[in-house]
Image (spheres, rainbow, N blue to C red):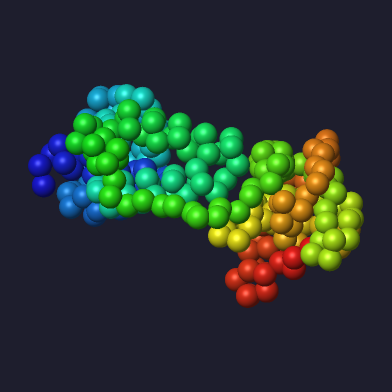
Amino acid sequence: MPRTDRLFRLLDLMRRLPQPVTAARLAEETGVSERTLYRDIDALRSAGARIEGEAGYGYTLAEDPALPPLMFDRLEIEALVLGLAEVRQMADAELAAAADSALARLAASVPERVQRQLLHAVTMSYQFAPPSPGVHAKLLRDAAWEERVVEIAYSDAQGQMTRRRVKPLALVFTDRATTLLAWCCLRRGFRRFRLPRISEARLTEESFRPERVALLRGIMEEMRGNASPQQS
């Protein structure tokens, strides 16, 4: 393998593999000796790549504007375009705008050949009747990121209105509805809330940060056991 190709492969491996990644693993993946691998690491550092770590410990790649352009193959480009198209159609306005921005940034950061593939992808997505994400998607998404409790007014399938305090964990977009996965303080369990049925939402100052990892683990265990959180 030519050295230039090997250096590109080394950068790609350091982006994808769990870090810190050992020199032995990198040498095996690139088909060189560890001594050659150390020289390659030094060459990348000299070219501007921020690589932290050392022999015997492992290496971590800190992304940097000085790194070479992003490289994707044609199938990866198709997957990115298709995924961003789905976001534009199914998500709320803020997330849809972020998808447009991400596509533009991606097009500006790849070589011209890849840029042409990006702008003229042959795979498309179209939703004839995309579900409404509701008017509170941004607030709920922010609350999940910030790990803060939200107070909501929610109408169930029978039209009964209740007020809940919930700990939002994730938004799920499907072809039928946009759903909030959360811990419901009223029902003392994991619940699914359809966003269009949330008529009011207020972000509180109460944090559930110390519980978040345990809650995520709990809801994933429920879902892996085919016991999807009950819909409210």
Would you place residue 66 above or below residue 204 in this image? above
Horizontal relation, residue 83 to residue 95: left or right: left
Residue 142, x across and y down, in percent: 68, 38
- Residue at 67% in and 39% down: 138
Give residue 116's position: percent from left, percent from top. 23, 37
Whether 137 is drawn above or below 186: the answer is above
Residue drawn 89% across the image and 55% down it: 162
Quarter of the image for the C terminus: give it.
bottom right
> Which residue occupies the foreground of this view, 100 or 50?
100
Answer with the quarter of the image where residue 11 lies.
Answer: top left
Q: Could you say which is closer to the camera, residue 202 or residue 185?
A: 202
Name which quarter of the figure residue 174 lies in.
bottom right
User: For the view shown, which residue lies furthest in the left direction?
Assistant: 2
Asked whether residue 56 is in view, the answer is no
Query: In the image, 175: left or right of 3?
Result: right
Is 18 left, or right, of 150 in this rendering? left
Residue 144, image x, y percentages: 69, 44
Seen from the viewer's position, the closer of residues 179 and 120 is 120
Camera-side residue: 60 or 140? 140
Determine if residue 12 is in view. yes
Q: Residue at x 50, y 55 (%)?
A: 128
